[in-house]
Image: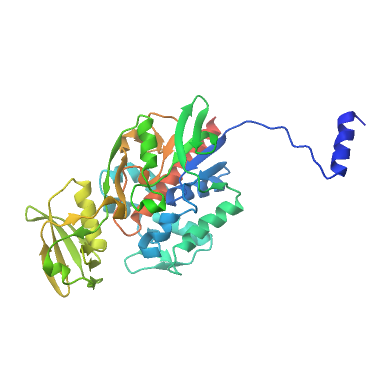
């Protein structure tokens, strides 16, 4: 018996095993952000055998998912990809067309159902966990990533992304990671307590990419109208609509819930009106409300701040990203998914579906490029 073999035998007898030789190689994919887009990306990577890890700045994954739809999580809508694209509108629809066609709402729903999520369908097609608990959606991701041994690094804000000849260095406050590819899925800048603080947009800006100004998309409106405020607490869930009036003419109309708050108006119909105004740069407008109990017009309401918006408008400019792959046109190996980009949709499951679909396309593209190499 040789000297090394004899030593190995003695070490094993004492319960000691020599550590294997260290190898230095990059992780195939570092996912920055553990929200809807990041978790879906990790799920797709795991199913395709693509090594990855997730870095999340907060103490738990899916913080914003947990609060969507008042904690019930309307994760998609039971409509076709083409209908969803039509509802989303331009310029986002053209950019997201391939992503949504390859990962339509039916695929999203089937994927959750296959992993044990019981689903409730509303009359308008919106899909929720049957339990009414957003935590069930996050648990689906957590269980799959646990079973696939995908590392989840929480309490781990990324401080920088540096391209190098053979990948990227992803820096945190305590250590760095060498990654072959990086997917930025950090979300927007609304509800910052959930971890959406605009850091992904800042990473893109530092790397020379154009970033559109961040602003509130789906958000309520303030008004000083005493008549409206006197109705605080009123909620019109059925048969209600809101119309965006510009110069006295109707520019957009949305059906759906209208709620009267102490400060003004909220609800799905209002949110979709403010999204239209923000997307088209309409600063001054009126909103005409119609309900089974009457109709009235709110003059010159003011949109609530970005930190309260359901979705952030703005972000990494769409012309900086290849819509066929979600890869940066300027920085090879750098990908984006979800709200960090200048993508948004109406309320009602559209924005989570956009996050899932763009994440799916990005990971599929990364996996395909890895096979080619």
Vertical placement of 317 versus 58: above or below?
above
> What residue lies at 41% left-to-right and 35% top-to-bottom?
327
Tell me residue 187's x, y (percent): 38, 47
Tell me residue 38's x, y (percent): 46, 47
Q: Quadrant of the C terminus?
A: top right
The quarter holding residue 299 reads bottom left
Tell me residue 341's x, y (percent): 34, 42
Residue 20 visible, this angle? yes
Work out which residue is located at the far front of the displayed protein and give it: 173
Vertical placement of 295 versus 251: above or below?
below
Left-right relation of 342 to 114: left
Left-right relation of 83 to 263: right
Given residues 73 and 261, the one toward you in this image is 261
Vertical placement of 160 versus 263: above or below?
above
Given residues 78 and 132, the one toward you in this image is 132
Q: Quadrant of the N terminus?
A: top right
Work out which residue is located at the far bottom of the displayed protein and give it: 293
Given residues 66 and 350, the one toward you in this image is 66
């Amino acid at each position: 018996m040789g000297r090394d073999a004899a030593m190995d035998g003695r070490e094993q007898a004492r319960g000691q095993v020599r550590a294997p030789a260290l190898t230095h190689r990059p992780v195939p994919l570092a996912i920055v952000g553990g929200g809807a887009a990041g978790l879906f990306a990790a799920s797709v990577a795991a199913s395709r055998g693509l090594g990855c890890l997730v870095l999340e700045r907060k103490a738990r994954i899916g913080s914003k998912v947990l609060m969507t739809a008042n904690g019930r999580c309307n994760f998609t809508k039971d409509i076709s990809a083409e209908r969803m694209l039509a509802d989303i509108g331009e310029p986002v629809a053209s950019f997201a067309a391939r992503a949504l066609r390859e990962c339509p709402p039916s695929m999203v729903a089937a994927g959750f159902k296959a992993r044990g999520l019981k689903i409730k369908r509303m009359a308008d097609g919106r899909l929720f966990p049957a339990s009414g608990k957003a935590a069930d959606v996050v648990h689906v991701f957590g269980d799959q990533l646990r079973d696939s041994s995908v590392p989840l690094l929480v309490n781990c804000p990324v401080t920088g992304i540096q391209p190098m000849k053979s990948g990227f260095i992803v820096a945190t406050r305590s250590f760095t990671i060498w990654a072959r590819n990086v997917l930025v899925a950090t979300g927007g800048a609304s509800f910052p307590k959930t971890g959406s603080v605009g850091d992904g947009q800042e990473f893109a800006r530092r790397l020379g990419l154009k970033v559109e100004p961040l602003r509130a998309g789906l958000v309520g409106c303030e008004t000083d109208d005493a008549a409206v405020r006197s109705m605080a607490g009123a909620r019109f869930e059925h048969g209600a609509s809101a119309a965006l009036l510009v110069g006295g003419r109707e520019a957009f109309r949305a059906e759906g819930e209208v709620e009267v708050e102490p400060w003004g108006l909220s609800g799905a119909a209002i949110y979709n009106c403010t999204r239209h105004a923000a997307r088209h740069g309409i600063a001054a407008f009126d909103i005409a409300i119609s309900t089974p109990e009457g109709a009235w017009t709110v003059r010159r309401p003011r949109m609530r701040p970005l930190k309260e918006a359901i979705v952030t408008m703005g972000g990494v400019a769409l012309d900086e990203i290849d819509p066929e792959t979600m890869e940066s046109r300027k920085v090879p190996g750098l990908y984006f998914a979800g709200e960090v980009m200048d993508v948004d949709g109406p309320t009602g499951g559209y924005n989570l579906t956009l996050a899932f679909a763009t994440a799916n396309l990005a990971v599929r593209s990364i996996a395909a490029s890895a096979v080619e190499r």
